[in-house]
Image (cartoon, rainbow, N blue to C red):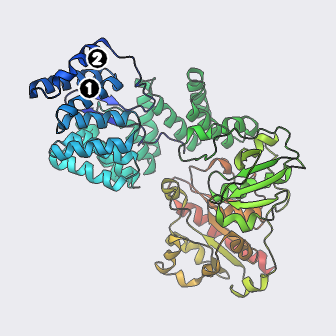
Amino acid sequence: MSYTNLTIILCLVLDGLGILLLDFDFDSTSRPSAAWVSLSTCAACAIGGTRHETEQLFQYGRQMHDAGQLADAERVFRDVLAADAEHAESWHRLGVIALQTGRMQEALASFDRAIRRKRLNAIFHVHRAHALSALGRSLDALESARQALRLKPQMPEALFVLGHALYDLNRPIEAVAAYREALRRDPRLPDLRNALALALWDTNRHAEAIAMLREVARHDPADLATRQNLVGMLKDTGMLTEAETLAREILLRRPDDAVSHFNLALTLFLAERFDEAWPEWAWRFQADPAITMPYGDPEWRGEPSSGRTLLVHAEQGMGDAIQFCRYLDRIPAGTEVVLQVHRPLVRLLSHCPNVARTIALDDPTPHYDLRVPIMSLPLALGATHSDDGTMASPYIVPSLDRAEHWRALLPDGRQPRVGLVWAGNPERTRMDRRRSVPLAQFAPLLAVPGVSFVSLQKGNAARDLTTVPFGGAIHDPTEALHDFADTAALIAELDLVIASDTAVAHLAGAMGKPIWLLNRADTCWRWGLGRTDSVWYPAMRQFRQDTAGDWSSAIGRAAEALPGFVAGHAG
């Protein structure tokens, strides 16, 4: 879901001065005003002058700040501090200006200095919490918000930033409660309903979230963040026509709005209108801060590459790299291709066709003439039709030189061997919560007789085997899995893989292994809407949630289908 990040748009309330909505594109380079010119002439008088003169200087700066003259105001506050280094309100104002201009560490340092001088001012702690949230220090932000509430119970601004911190800590139910209380206390707080809608979405209350954003958009058509988030939610609930219409309306007014281009791409992918989707997909790096791009040079667009070195680099998850390796053999002959991927994929993908060398993302980048993100290959190669990504045959073939070794780690083959994966990368917190399945819910599958179940689960979620009553019935050879080459070799010895939406699902699909995907209701763009198969992997079968968060429906249908698979294996 490409929704506006709550830590980017922050609501700041300055004590007694009204509300400022932080926009980090704010133009703080305005020309000095007449007020600043006259003020600068008396600044020297204030330095070393009386407390009254210092306070008068601060009030001038305050007026400039409230008028949006950030650079001028900052100079005034620094003049105040030159006269009185203990002036807490000036430190606070400098922190707010630093927040508004995206200087988060500087903002935090300023708020800390203000709090050291006036530790009982609740708004100082609120703004400190905003800075901490923007720096990704959500636990510290939570404590700062709570400190503000200890000083001023039920303060709406503190409840608002408390909700942000809880949301960022993957505690959306508590975030909803905090936002609702803030809304009850002060319904005028900007962006509050937008934040509440996102938290409601993450608690699977999708209809409420959409209704709230529709209401906000109706009352404030200029609220871009709300309209962007509404497009994302409409898309994720399958209301593609409405999502597309709204995205295109935004783009008519703001043709360069990257988030709307990105959401439009995802909408078109879900509708399987790939020709239209791929050009819009090119906006992803500008739209989503979670998609990093370490290279500043232009990417390859398909121009002649023979005799040149082309760096093809991974950009998002390992599953994405596995999925898009299918395009490597279409790169023009005579091009020296260097493939740069996540380290656990290096050995697996080192034998991809048309690749001269495979390196890890954290290896030194070699010389190259051209470069392209791996998920831009379809656009660069002109392979944008709906059938251009069709997999004619397995394109990842594991090494079979140690097949006996891997076979010895598994139960004998008298019963079909079924690999299980239930959780993805926990670092992608919000995504992982939606796509991962609590292992306890696999019980209906484990009740199917005549199956040897094998864990392919790595990471912290592997510990779940010790917490479920049927854990002992799942054979666990994962200590021998050191990278995806090992995982592929093990999958080669299985008859079926049942997995949530993870890299292992892509790997099994790329190998042509039967793969049953346990898929969430608000599906990823690549799995289409309402499909039980996949345009990407011919051997994939999908089992989808009926409603968001309800894995029992998907797993129940898979459990009903598994005896048929067992019978076919016996035959």
Rendering quarter of residue 508: bottom right
Q: Does residue 181 show up?
A: no
- Quadrant of the image occupied by residue 340: bottom right
Q: Amino acid at mark 2?
A: Trp
Of 316 and 431, the residue lying toward us: 316
At 61% from the left and 78% from the top, the residue drawn is 478
Labels 1 and 2 touching (C-beta < 8 A): yes
Nearer to the camera, 509 or 362 = 362
Q: Nearer the viewer, residue 253 or 337?
A: 337
Residue 176 is situated, as x and y percent measured from the top left of the image, at 34, 47
Q: Compared to 405, does 204 lie above or below?
A: above
Residue of label 1: 76
How far from the left and from the top, in percent, is residue 45? 17, 21
**How far across and down, in percent of the image, does residue 362 sit?**
62, 59
Q: Residue furthest top?
A: 34
Query: Residue placed at 43% from the left, 47% from the top?
Result: 205
* Amino acid beneath label 1: Val
Residue of label 2: 36
Q: Is residue 385 left or right of residue 340?
A: right
**Residue 281 seen by the camera:** yes
Q: Residue furthest right?
A: 333
Write the residue at 33% across / 35% down. 11
x then y, percent, for residue 331: 84, 48
Q: Is residue 4 left or right of residue 122?
A: right
Distance of label 1 from label 2 (alpha carbons): 8 Å
Q: Which tag, 1 or 2, sits closer to the chain's start? A: 2
In the rendered view, tell whether residue 28 sits above or below residue 380: above
Residues packed near mark 2 inside 10 Å, few (<14), some (14 to 19) or many (20 plus): some
